C-alpha cells in the first residue's frame, strides 16, 4: 500500500492551526502578528487559513485595491515558517458591492431579495458577481502565486446555495434544456400531466413548483451543479493569474442542500468543517459514531486519500444551544477522531477570538485574555504535541472491506416525495438517521468502513450496506447485481428501489429496476405505524442464536412476499403478522439480505455482527470492543497506527492482538489488555 502525497506537498507533517483573521486587530494592536506567532509556536501550530472574509479590505471601494496589509501578514508568516491557505474572498462581498449591485444578493423562495448584510448570501448565477470574483481572484493569484507562505488556495467558505432570483431561474431552464433536449422529454420525465402541469415553453418552468417531484429534485441537482461551476470559475481565475498551488474548499458535514460528492473531483484535497454537539453526560458513542461516519465519507471521496479537518472548535461554538464547554480531554478526543479517520491535520475555527461581531464568543485557541495560560490553549498545545508525533501517518489510509452507500440523490428524492418520510413519526432526515443506524454496529465493532455515493465502484469490497436506497440512478441496480453475482454480500432495507432518477415510481413491483429478482422478494405495500401501535420482528431461525427473539419494529413496515428468498424473520403483529420482515437471497456467488422494517438497534447490532463473523471482516483489535469504544487504524502497508478512544463513562479493558504494540506518544511497549479511561485516546503502532 502506497502513501498518498501530503496534504501540503512541501510539508510532510500533520497540519495544525486554523482560521486566522489578524486584519481584525492590525490597527488596535499593532504587534498582533508578533504576539500570535509566539503563541502559534507555543501551541505547535503551523498552518493557517487567511483572508477568508477580507474582500472589503482588499477592495474598500470599487476598483481601488490594497494588498500591502496582506503582504505584511504573509511575509511575517513565511518568516515564521507558517503555512498559509490563502482564501478567495467570495464568501463575503464588500458593502459597496451589495449596495451598487443589489442583484448579487440572494432571493428567497418567496421572491424577496435578502438585502440584510451578512455573508455567504450571494447568488451564484449573478454575472456581475462572477466577474468581480474572477477579478479579485486573478489579482490575488498574480500577487501571491510565488509567495513562500502560500501553500494552498482555500476557495471561498462553505459553499451553499438557496437563491431563486430570475437569473437563477433562467439558468435552471438552460440547465434543463441541456439535460432533456426537448420539452417533450422533460414533460415525460416529470410526469407533468399530473395536476395539468405540462409545459409548452421553457419559460413556463418555475423551480418553486410544488406539484412535480421531478422538478424539485432537478432544482436541487441544479443548485449543486451551479456551485461546482462557480468553484471551477474561482479556480480558473486563480490559474489565469498564474497560481499553481493546489486548491481546496471547506465542506459542511452532511449539509442538506449541497451534494458535496459532486465537488470532490474539482478540488485537490477534501476539507471539512465539523462541530459536534457532545452531550458529555453519559456515553457519547452515538455522537462519536455519527461523526466518524462523516469522516469516513470524506476519506472515501477521493478513494481513501487523506482529507483535512479545516474547521473545528477547540472550545465551544457560541451557536451551540446551549454552548456547553468541552470537558477536559474532549477536544483531544474530537481532534484525534478526525485523524483516526483519515484527516492529515487539525485546524480550528478560530485562532483568536475577536472582540466584536456575531462570533465574539465563539471558542478559539486564544481567548480574550490574550495569553497562553488558559485551559483551552493548553489543550491545543497538547494536541500539537501529539500531532508532532504523528508525522509518519501523513498520507496513510484505512483499507475498508465494507462500503456504505450514502447519497444526497437518495436523500433529496426522499425529501421531495410527499408521504414517504416527511410526515409525523419519522423526522425529516430519516434517510441519514437510517444509514447511521446501520453504520453504528461497524463503528462499535471497530470494522473500518468506506462511505460512497450510489454510483461508485463497489468491486473491491466484500460487504455493501445500502440502507433505504429509495432512488436508483441509472446503472446502480446493475452494479449491485454484478457485485452480488461476483460473491459480494449486500444489505438493503425498506424503501429500496422505489423511484428512478426522475423521481418516478418503478412499475412492475418493488424493489424496482431488477432488484426484485436480485432480492428474491416483492414489496407490495408499506405501512407507517402510529407511535402507539405495536409491531415486532420475530426471529426464530435456530441457525442464528444471537438474533432469536422478538425485537421492536416500525414505524415503517414493508409488506412483502418472498419470491425465492429465504425468510429469516417475520412480523409479529398487525394484519400482516407472520409475513416476512427479513429475507436472504442467494444470487450468483453472493447473497442479499433485505430488512423490511426499522428495528431495535440491538437487533441491528446482532445482524451486522453476524455478517461480520460470516465474512470474517477485519476488526481493529481482532475482537469486539467494550461499549463506547471507537477503534480504527491507518496504514502505509508496513506499519499500522491504531486509534483507541473511549467515549464511554467507565474505564475499560481492550484486548490487543498478539502483535507487539508501541504507544506512539510515550514510546513504550503496551501489553494486552490495555486499560482505557473515559475520554482517553491511545495511539498505538504495530506491524501491518
Ligand atoms: C463555519 C464558518 C466559519 C465560522 C464557524 C463558526 O460554518 O465557516 O466561518 O462561522 O462556522 O462555528
Image (cartoon, rainbow, N blue to C red):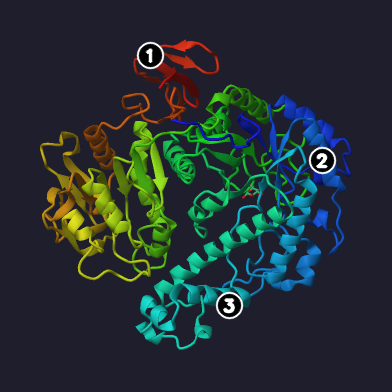
Disc 3 on helix, strand or loop? Answer: helix
Disc 2 on helix, strand or loop? Answer: helix
| Residue 622 appears in view | yes
Q: CA distance from mark 1 to mark 3?
A: 65 Å
Which disc number belongs to residue 464? none
- Indicate left or right for 325 with 130 as reference: left
Q: Are marks 2 and 1 in contact (CB under 8 Å)?
A: no
- Indicate left or right for 121 with 287 as reference: right
Mark 1 or mark 3, earlier in chain: 3
Q: Are marks 2 and 3 in contact (CB under 8 Å)?
A: no
Q: CA distance from mark 2 to mark 3?
A: 42 Å
Q: Quadrant of residue 389?
A: top right
- The residue indicated by pointer 2 is 73
Circle 3 crowding by C-alpha within 10 Å: few under 14, some 14–19, many from 20? some
Badge nearest the viewer, 1 or 3? 3
Image spot of residue 623 (x, y percent): 31, 25
In the image, is residue 33 above or below residue 581?
above
- The residue indicated by pointer 3 is 170
Residue name at image x 55 percent, y 50 percent: 252
Q: Quadrant of the N terminus?
A: top left
Q: Quadrant of the C terminus?
A: top left
Image spot of residue 631 (x, y percent): 41, 29
- Indicate left or right for 168 with 473 as reference: right
Disc 1 on helix, strand or loop? Answer: loop
Q: Is mark 3 within 8 Å of ligand 1?
A: no
- Indicate left or right for 110 with 400 as reference: right
- The residue indicated by pointer 1 is 672
Mark 2 or mark 1, earlier in chain: 2
Residue name at image x 70 percent, y 28 percent: 374
Mark 2 or mark 3, earlier in chain: 2
Badge nearest the viewer, 2 or 1? 2
Amino acid at each position: 500500500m502506497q502513501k498518498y502525497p501530503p496534504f501540503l506537498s512541501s510539508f510532510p507533517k500533520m497540519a495544525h492551526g486554523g482560521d486566522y483573521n489578524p486584519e481584525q486587530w492590525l490597527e488596535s494592536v499593532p504587534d498582533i502578528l508578533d504576539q500570535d506567532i509566539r503563541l502559534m509556536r507555543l501551541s505547535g501550530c503551523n498552518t493557517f487559513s487567511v483572508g477568508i472574509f477580507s474582500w472589503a479590505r482588499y477592495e474598500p471601494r470599487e476598483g481601488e485595491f490594497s494588498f500591502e496589509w496582506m503582504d505584511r501578514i504573509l511575509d511575517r508568516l513565511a518568516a515564521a515558517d507558517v503555512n498559509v491557505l490563502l482564501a478567495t474572498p467570495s464568501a463575503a462581498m464588500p458593502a459597496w458591492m451589495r449596495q451598487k449591485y443589489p442583484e448579487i444578493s440572494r432571493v428567497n423562495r418567496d421572491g424577496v431579495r435578502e438585502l440584510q448584510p451578512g455573508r455567504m448570501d450571494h447568488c451564484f448565477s449573478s454575472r456581475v458577481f462572477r466577474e468581480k470574483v474572477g477579478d479579485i481572484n486573478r489579482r490575488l493569484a498574480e500577487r501571491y502565486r510565488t509567495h513562500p507562505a502560500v501553500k494552498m488556495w482555500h476557495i471561498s467558505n462553505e459553499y451553499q446555495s438557496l437563491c431563486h432570483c430570475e437569473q437563477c431561474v433562467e439558468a435552471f431552464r438552460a440547465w434543463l434544456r441541456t439535460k432533456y433536449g426537448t420539452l417533450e422529454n422533460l414533460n415525460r420525465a416529470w410526469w407533468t400531466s399530473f395536476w395539468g402541469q405540462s409545459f409548452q415553453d421553457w419559460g413556463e418552468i418555475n423551480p418553486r413548483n410544488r406539484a412535480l417531484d421531478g422538478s424539485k429534485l432537478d432544482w436541487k441537482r441544479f443548485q449543486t451543479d451551479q456551485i461546482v461551476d462557480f468553484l471551477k470559475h474561482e479556480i480558473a481565475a486563480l490559474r489565469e493569474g498564474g497560481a499553481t498551488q493546489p486548491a481546496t474548499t471547506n465542506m459542511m458535514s452532511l449539509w442538506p442542500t449541497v451534494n458535496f460528492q459532486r465537488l470532490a473531483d474539482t478540488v485537490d484535497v477534501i476539507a471539512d468543517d465539523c462541530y459536534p454537539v457532545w452531550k458529555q453526560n453519559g456515553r457519547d458513542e452515538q455522537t462519536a459514531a455519527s461523526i466518524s461516519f462523516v469522516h469516513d465519507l470524506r476519506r472515501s471521496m477521493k478513494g481513501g486519500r487523506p482529507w483535512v479537518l479545516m474547521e473545528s472548535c477547540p472550545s465551544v461554538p457560541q451557536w451551540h444551544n446551549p454552548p456547553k464547554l468541552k470537558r477536559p480531554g474532549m477536544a483531544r478526543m474530537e481532534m484525534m477522531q478526525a485523524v483516526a479517520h483519515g484527516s492529515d491535520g487539525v485546524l480550528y475555527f478560530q485562532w483568536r477570538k475577536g472582540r466584536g461581531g456575531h462570533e465574539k464568543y465563539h471558542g478559539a485557541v486564544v481567548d480574550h485574555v490574550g495569553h497562553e495560560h488558559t485551559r483551552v490553549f493548553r489543550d491545543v498545545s497538547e494536541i500539537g504535541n501529539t500531532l508532532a508525533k504523528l508525522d509518519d501517518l501523513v498520507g496513510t489510509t484505512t483499507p475498508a472491506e465494507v462500503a456504505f452507500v450514502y447519497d444526497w440523490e437518495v436523500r433529496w428524492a426522499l425529501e421531495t416525495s410527499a408521504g414517504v418520510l416527511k410526515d409525523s413519526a419519522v423526522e425529516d432526515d430519516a434517510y441519514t438517521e437510517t444509514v447511521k443506524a446501520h453504520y453504528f454496529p461497524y463503528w462499535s465493532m471497530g470494522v473500518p468502513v468506506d462511505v460512497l455515493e450510489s454510483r461508485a465502484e463497489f468491486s473491491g469490497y466484500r460487504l455493501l450496506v445500502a440502507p433505504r436506497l429509495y432512488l436508483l440512478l441509472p446503472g446502480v441496480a446493475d452494479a449491485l447485481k454484478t457485485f452480488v453475482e461476483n460473491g459480494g454480500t449486500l444489505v438493503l432495507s425498506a424503501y429500496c428501489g422505489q423511484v428512478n432518477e426522475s423521481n418516478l415510481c418503478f412499475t412492475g413491483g418493488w424493489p424496482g429496476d431488477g432488484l426484485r429478482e436480485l432480492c428474491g422478494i416483492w414489496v407490495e405495500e408499506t405501512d407507517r405505524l402510529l407511535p402507539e401501535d405495536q409491531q415486532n420482528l420475530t426471529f426464530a431461525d435456530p441457525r442464528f442464536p444471537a438474533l432469536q427473539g422478538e425485537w421492536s419494529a416500525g414505524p415503517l413496515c414493508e409488506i412483502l412476499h418472498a419470491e425465492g428468498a429465504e425468510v429469516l424473520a417475520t412480523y409479529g403483529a398487525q394484519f400482516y403478522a407472520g409475513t416476512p420482515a427479513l429475507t436472504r437471497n442467494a444470487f450468483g456467488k453472493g447473497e442479499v439480505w433485505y430488512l423490511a422494517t426499522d428495528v431495535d438497534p440491538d437487533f441491528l447490532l446482532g445482524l451486522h455482527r453476524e455478517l461480520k463473523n460470516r465474512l470474517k471482516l477485519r476488526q481493529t483489535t481482532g475482537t469486539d470492543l467494550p461499549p463506547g469504544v471507537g477503534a480504527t487504524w491507518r496504514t502505509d502497508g508496513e506499519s499500522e497506527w491504531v486509534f483507541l478512544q473511549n467515549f464511554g463513562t467507565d474505564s475499560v479493558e481492550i484486548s490487543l492482538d498478539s502483535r507487539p504494540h508501541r504507544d506512539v506518544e510515550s514510546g513504550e511497549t503496551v501489553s494486552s489488555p490495555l486499560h482505557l479511561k473515559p475520554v482517553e485516546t491511545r495511539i498505538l503502532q504495530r506491524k501491518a
